[in-house]
Image (tube, grey):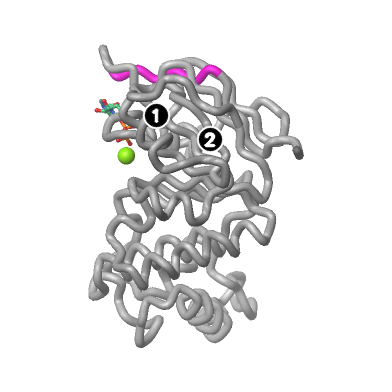
Amino acid sequence: MTEPVLSLRGILKHYGPVHALDGVDFDLHPAEIVGLVGDNGAGKSTLVKVMSGAIEPDAGTILFEGKPITIRSPLEAREIGIETVYQDLAVIPWLDVEANLFLGREITGARWWNRWLLDKPAMRREAASHIASLRVGLKSVRQPVGLLSGGQRQSVAVARAISWGRKVVIMDEPTAALGVRESEGVLDLIRRVKERGLAVVLISHNIPHVFEVTDRIFVLRQGREAGTLITKKAHVSEVVGLITGVHVAAAVA
Ligand SMILES: Nc1ncnc2c1ncn2[C@@H]1O[C@H](COP(=O)(O)OP(=O)(O)O)[C@@H](O)[C@H]1O
Ligand SMILES: [Mg+2]
């Protein structure tokens, strides 16, 4: 297998007496989709926040393309090519869809009086094509995001991460608020991200969705790895067993 794009070693994160992460090792390879599953409170969001620079672990090492790094903020994570879609929606309600997609990296066109003018037509074309591929049924990319349904908003957040992620895209429950059709759109996009060689971490409670798109399934339980399964060799009951702690041994990926 190729060298991991992202490796975590011995990650610890405690909140007072709570061991949110208790020595987690995790590898992610280019063009690989890894499902991160576990019961409520297992440590999934905390692990994602460590990978995306939102929190610093108490101990442990993060390697990016083989080199030890410290990710001090989500902005730093983004600069090295790690994009994250958080569980709690990260869109700006009063801006329209297009502005949300291009937030912080507006396409620049002509230069005027020492500043770049936004290339609105180019932004609109790109935004429309990302949104069309999500099949969320938006009439226009100029609608304020605050007027959209929860599912449509989440799709905008996913489209944004997928458009900009260069190495790693992390998604915390991207289909949780979505209907069947919207979910299929997001799953299709995840598959396309993999085709571009990006690595994806997908957190989901929806085990069928995890089986549909992932290559490996990493199960967290009480802040520790309960097991890692190769998706095409795994069975739903094994994953459920690892999540609940009924099975302790697991096939090693
Ligand atoms: N900011 C925080 N302060 C205190 N405890 C936290 C904080 N974030 C997470 N925890 C605790 O850490 C554990 C893991 O939480 P989390 O990573 O959110 O789990 P998951 O995403 O798998 O549901 C839980 O017991 C949770 O209550
Ligand atoms: Mg969570």
Left or right of residue 221, residue 72 in this image:
right
* Closer to us: 193 or 114: 193
* Closer to us: 176 or 141: 176
* Residue drawn at the location 69% of the way across and 36% of the way down: 4
Asked whether 34 falls inside the magenta stretch, the response is no
Farthest residue to the top: give it: 17
* Residue drawn at the location 54% of the way across and 44% of the way down: 231
Secondary element at tag 1: helix
Q: Main secondary structure of the magenta part?
A: strand
In the depicted structure, whether residue 48 falls above or below residue 18? below
Q: Earlier in the sequence, mark 2 or mark 1?
A: 2
**Is any atom of residue 78 visible in this view?**
no
Q: Residues within 10 Å of mark 1 (few under 14, many from 20)?
A: many
Left or right of residue 153, residue 1 in this image:
right
Left or right of residue 2, residue 243 in this image:
left
* Residue drawn at the location 47% of the way across and 62% of the way down: 187
The mark tally for this picture is 2
Secondary element at tag 2: strand
**Is any atom of residue 188 visible in this view?**
yes
Residue that label 2 marks:
229
Q: Amino acid at mark 2?
A: Leu
Residue that label 1 marks:
242
In the depicted structure, whether residue 13 falls above or below residue 64? above
Asked whether 12 falls inside the magenta stretch, the response is yes
Snapshot quadrant of residue 157: bottom left
Give the quadrant of ligand 2: top left
| Location of residue 163 in the rendering, given as x and y in whole percent from the top left corner | 56, 64
Q: What range of the chain is rendered magenta?
A: 10-15
Q: Are marks 2 and 1 in contact (CB under 8 Å)?
A: yes
